[in-house]
Image: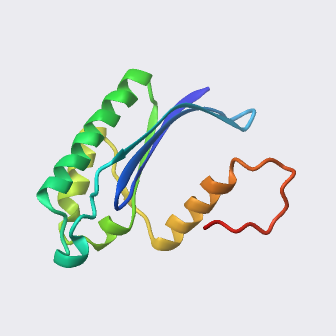
Amino acid sequence: MTRVAAVDCGTNSIRLLIADVDVTAGTLTDVTRTMTVVRLGQGVDKTGEFAADALERTLAATDDYAAQCRDAGVEAVRFVATSATRDARNRDEFLDGVRARLGVTPEVISGDEEARLSFRGATSVLDAGHDAPFLVA
């Protein structure tokens, strides 16, 4: 059993999932799920940059998530950032802050990858009795 964490940092919120993965059985068991509203994308459409207070809120949440990962004995972390980070000119300031706090290189994923992961997450809770196609709104 391996304990892992995934952090999804979007335009408005940042989410943490800590889970135990059993590769042999192909199972994932949630340990912790946390979501914090940080409004990272506040003003990015208007200015093209992250606002200082938005960065501060998001990096404070990242500090908290890093502590939760340490306390839970997490062995591997994947951090993904989405739309606002793709669009912000000062994204390197944010990405460097995440790297310093979590010790991992954040991934700025494409819109297509964001959609793929969102779909997988939304449909992962469906049991085998549901047949495709699926509509995720």
Give the x, y percent position of residue 59. Answer: 23, 46
Left or right: residue 103 versus residue 32 is left
Residue drawn at x 69%, y 55% as measured from the top left: 123
83 over 118 or under it: above or below: below
In percent of the image, x 81 and y 65: which residue is there?
A: 132
Residue 129, x across and y down, in percent: 87, 51
- Quarter of the image with the C terminus in it: bottom right
- Height in image: 93 above or below 69? below
Q: Quadrant of the N terminus?
A: top right
The number of discs equals 0
Residue 69 position within the rendered picture, expressed as x and y whole percent measured from the top left: 39, 30
Residue nearest the viewer, comparing 108 with 34? 34
Position of residue 113 measured from the top left corner of the image (x, y, whole percent): 52, 67
* Side (left or right) of 128 relative to 126: right
Q: Is residue 75 above or below residue 98?
A: above
Residue at the spot 29% in from the left edge and 51% down from the top edge = 38
Image color mode: rainbow
Give the residue drawn at x 23%, y 71%.
Answer: 44
State the image quarter where residue 77 is shown. Answer: top left
Decide if residue 132 is on the left or right side of residue 46: right
